[in-house]
Image: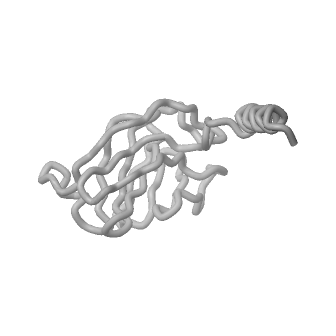
Amino acid sequence: MKKCCRDFVFAFCCILAMAFGGCGGYKHATIPEVDVNFTIYPNDAAYAALNHIGGYMYFTGGVAGIVVYRLDSGTFLAYDRACPYDWEDKEAWIKVEASGLTLADEHCGSRFNILDGGVIEGPAQFPLKTYKTRFDGMILRVYN
């Protein structure tokens, strides 16, 4: 195949991939997209709750705030606090339950697994909205 044909085929495939695959990433079924991009220094005393496995903290951002949970020494999970069932209700914020293993919307009664955001019980049919995290040992970035 001639070089000009290969270049055309490559460009055409790239355009198709962008059109159908897109760069939009994960879109939640009920919760709208908002830009999230902030950094945390978990080793700083201000973030002491994130210094141990199972620790969590609440942050502003997202649709209804964000809960960041430390899964292990190098892994953090971040969920929007908006409940997928009634996200427009300002009283329907997700909170970490006393066990530290589940999250709940006390308003509608939905409960979620803290390890993956999946529904455990309640009227919610969709998991929690997740955000990406990247930790380099010093700086934690939460973004979408």
Name the residue: 57% across, 38% down.
Answer: 86
Q: How many marks?
A: 0
Q: Quadrant of the N terminus?
A: top right
Is 21 left, or right, of 129 in this rendering? right
Is 64 left, or right, of 86 in this rendering? left
Name the residue: 48% across, 64% down.
Answer: 115
Q: Nearer the viewer, residue 120 or 70?
A: 70
Q: Position of residue 75 (x, y in %)?
A: 38, 63
The extreme left residue here reads 45
**What color scheme is it?**
one colour
The extreme right residue here reads 1
Is 7 left, or right, of 142 in this rendering? right
Q: Position of residue 49 (x, y in %)?
A: 22, 58
Name the residue: 39% across, 38% down.
Answer: 65
The vertical placement of 24 against 47, above or below, is: above
Q: Position of residue 13 (x, y in %)?
A: 78, 38
